[in-house]
Image (cartoon, helix red, strand yellow):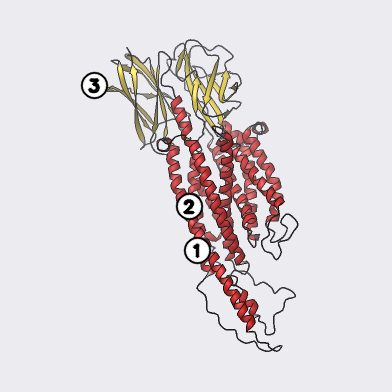
């Protein structure tokens, strides 16, 4: 009965589980663009109807065919013009109203594409003449389609995994030059095909992902044509085109000691140095592939764009060389344990009479004679491992430097490190990276031991060969050979060093999974810089006749943060109306099970007065809040986001006579 192979002996399966772990730990990606201001402002009461609406964001945004939808007080859609940017302002979205609007409260639903390719949506209201007595229930459209978003995320992370495997395994072959790159043929092909399939899926799903529609929208040719006219679509198309020349170079990588791109043979099946032309083509392709990510993610917008894109490309390449190289090394170490058939005696070579050659036996190192390693030149593999140790160290150094820069660019200030979800996640990632560096240090120690073992074994083998050559006694043809003197076993055990290295590499991969999970969640979190800009730009007061207060909240659970926008009208002593709208972490409208509001006047010992808000379908409100005295009132909002999670936050407002 055949025993199943352990998981650590199946690198392909281990890589698949790594991707699943990354996907399992990744929440839905939050868009990184936030609304900085709206004109007219949210909740504003205007004397006359505006001719257009303009939204300003914290970064450049892309527009869709249906970026704006305007609804009248009865909930009917109003015809609008085509969405455009304000002249010279790619961080704005504007739409004109061709006809004259009537009186009442109008709702504007909007949807744009953030510079990091994520769609972001939301809604706000303004009133003409006076607010409507009751608000109509309006369907502003889905924030996202769960099926489309899930498939898009799956393809997105598969693309990252395929790129890491393809670039990392290729770099391992070219830089580390293992004695037999044959076992790496499968990881290289798996990376290429994974990247091809995921890129095609991303290209097809791009249009329905942006519009929030179902996966069936991927079959619309017009939607595909629209995708190819935008920056994310062009980046995906470029990635597909780059995979063609990559496929031409792949077969040359795994030819053992054969054609290295210059027509020269490495000879003897050993490692062959790539020609400068071949190496240059591989480097250009890797840089170009990494650039297709940088050109469509958050690095392409914001401050210091050239430096950010350079940092993003280097960060992605360092990640691929390190993690993909670890997978390649694990593949070789796994193949090293598989039993190999004894190699036949090369033609033309004969042994001395008696069937033994003491000199030849003496120079074979213990590593070369280790059981189950007949397939490999273990000293050559030791050299490849030593080279990868240096490459991995350099890759980690690049990751740290570029990661620090990207973190600074995303945070914007030291206070955001503790006050924003992005900063807190970044602290967790720093701890995980420290553990990862410790695991990498352990691998380097095992590599040093393996190199020392192989070097001492080689020295002992040369000594034995010299002794055997001096003491050889001529034997007549067919005569028995003299028994060779037994050589005491040395204190070194190459197999033990290889097993230790294999375990440390597995540990490194495991900690790397943890870092990738945290990085995935971090990439879907609003950067601290954008969060601070959005908070500073949030209006604290509306037009005359209404007071608008924004209260941020965070219950400390995934998806449990946002803000409550409270409009108090007229904001004077006596009867007041209250409208409270809850926005989620992506800036879109959010539904919560309960919202409570109370007001108190500490200077006079009045309150708290419960506003008794009622859910009116899309917002919470009341028309019967009575404030008896002017002064500085404390407004306390309690938001419950689930059966168990709630938080209370307070702000002060001025109530006049």
What residue is shown with label 3?
A: 605
Relative depth, front residue between 308 and 570? 308
The location of residue 251, given as percent across then percent down, is 70, 55
Q: Residues within 10 Å of mark 3 (few under 14, many from 20)?
A: few
User: Quarter-wise, where is residue 634 in the image?
Assistant: top left
The reply to whether residue 294 is visible in this rendering is yes
**Disc nearer the start of the sequence (1/2):** 2
**Residues at discs 1 and 3 in contact (Cβ within 8 Å):** no
- Closer to viewer: mark 1 or mark 3: 1
Q: In the drawing, what numbered circle is on residue 437?
A: 2
Give me the C-alpha separation between circle 1 and circle 2.
17 Å
- Quadrant in which the C terminus appears: top left
Point 55% across, 51% down: residue: 394
User: Quarter-wise, where is residue 315 in the image?
Assistant: top right
Give me the C-alpha separation between circle 1 and circle 3.
71 Å
User: Quarter-wise, where is residue 243 in the image?
Assistant: top right
The location of residue 354, given as percent across then percent down, is 67, 85
Residue with the most extreme left position: 605
Q: Residues within 10 Å of mark 2 (few under 14, many from 20)?
A: some
The location of residue 76, given as percent across then percent down, is 53, 19
The location of residue 166, given as percent across then percent down, is 62, 50
> Which type of secondary structure does the marked residue at label 3 adopt?
loop
The reply to whether residue 371 is visible in this rendering is no
Point 67% across, 82% down: residue: 355
Relative to 479, residue 80 above or below: above
> Which type of secondary structure does the marked residue at label 2 adopt?
helix
Count of numbered labels shown in the rendering: 3
**Disc nearer the start of the sequence (3/2):** 2
- Closer to viewer: mark 1 or mark 2: 2
What residue is shown with label 1?
A: 500
């Amino acid at each position: 009965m055949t025993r199943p192979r352990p998981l650590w002996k199946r690198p392909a399966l281990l890589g698949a589980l790594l991707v699943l772990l990354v996907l399992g730990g990744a929440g839905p990606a939050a868009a990184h663009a936030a609304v900085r201001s709206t004109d007219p402002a949210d909740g504003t009461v205007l004397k006359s109807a505006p001719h257009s609406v303009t939204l300003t964001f914290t970064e450049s945004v892309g527009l869709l065919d249906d970026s704006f939808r305007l609804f009248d007080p009865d909930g009917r859609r109003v015809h609008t013009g085509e969405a455009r940017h304000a002249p010279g302002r790619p961080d704005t979205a504007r739409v004109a109203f061709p006809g004259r609007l009537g009186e009442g409260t109008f709702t504007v639903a909007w949807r744009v594409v953030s510079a990091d390719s994520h769609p972001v949506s939301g809604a706000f209201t303004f009133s003409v003449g006076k607010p409507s007595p009751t608000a109509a229930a309006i369907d502003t459209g889905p924030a996202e389609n769960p099926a489309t978003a899930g498939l898009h995320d799956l393809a997105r992370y598969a693309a990252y995994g395929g790129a890491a495997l393809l670039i990392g395994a290729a770099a391992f072959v070219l830089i580390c030059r293992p004695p037999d790159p044959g076992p790496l043929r499968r990881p290289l092909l798996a990376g290429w095909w994974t990247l091809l399939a995921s890129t095609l899926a991303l290209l097809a799903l791009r249009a329905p992902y942006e519009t929030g529609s179902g996966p069936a929208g991927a079959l619309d040719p017009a939607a595909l044509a629209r995708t190819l006219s935008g920056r994310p679509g062009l980046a995906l198309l470029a990635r597909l085109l780059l995979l063609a020349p990559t496929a031409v170079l792949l077969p040359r990588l795994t030819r053992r000691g054969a054609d290295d791109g210059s027509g020269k043979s490495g000879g003897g099946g050993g490692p062959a140095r790539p020609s400068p032309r071949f190496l240059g083509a591989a480097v250009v392709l890797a840089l170009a592939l990494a650039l297709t990510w940088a050109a469509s993610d958050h690095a392409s917008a914001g401050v210091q764009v050239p430096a950010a894109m350079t940092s993003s490309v280097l960060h992605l390449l360092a990640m691929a060389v390190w993690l993909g190289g670890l997978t390649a090394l694990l593949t070789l170490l796994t193949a090293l344990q598989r039993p190999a058939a004894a190699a036949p005696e090369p033609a033309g070579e004969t042994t001395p009479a008696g069937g033994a050659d003491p000199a030849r036996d003496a120079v074979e190192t213990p590593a070369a004679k280790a059981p189950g390693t007949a397939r490999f030149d273990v000293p050559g593999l030791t050299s490849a491992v030593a080279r990868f140790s240096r490459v991995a160290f350099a890759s980690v150094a690049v990751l740290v430097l570029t990661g620090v820069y990207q973190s600074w660019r995303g945070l914007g200030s030291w206070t955001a490190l503790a006050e924003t979800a992005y900063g807190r996640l970044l602290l967790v990632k720093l701890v995980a990276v420290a553990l990862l560096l410790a695991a990498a240090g352990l691998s380097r120690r095992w590599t040093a031991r393996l190199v020392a073992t192989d070097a001492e074994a080689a020295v002992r083998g040369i000594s034995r060969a010299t002794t055997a050559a001096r003491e050889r006694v001529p034997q007549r043809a067919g005569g028995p050979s003299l028994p060779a003197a037994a050589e005491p076993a040395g204190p070194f055990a190459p197999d033990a060093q290889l097993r230790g290295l294999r375990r440390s590499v597995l540990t490194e991969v495991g900690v790397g999974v943890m870092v990738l999970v945290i990085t995935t969640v971090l990439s879907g979190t609003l950067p601290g810089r954008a969060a601070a800009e959005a908070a500073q730009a949030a209006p604290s007061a509306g037009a005359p006749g209404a007071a608008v207060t924004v209260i941020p909240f965070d219950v400390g659970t995934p998806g449990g943060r946002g803000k409550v926008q409270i409009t108090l009208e007229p904001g004077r002593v006596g009867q007041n109306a209250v409208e409270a709208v809850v926005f989620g972490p992506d800036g879109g409208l959010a539904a919560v099970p309960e919202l409570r509001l109370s007001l108190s006047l500490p200077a006079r010992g009045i309150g708290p007065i419960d506003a008794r808000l009622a859910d009116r379908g899309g917002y919470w409100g009341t028309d019967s809040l009575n404030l008896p005295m002017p002064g500085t009132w404390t407004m306390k909002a309690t938001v419950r986001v689930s059966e168990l999670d709630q938080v209370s936050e307070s702000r002060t407002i001025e109530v006049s006579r």
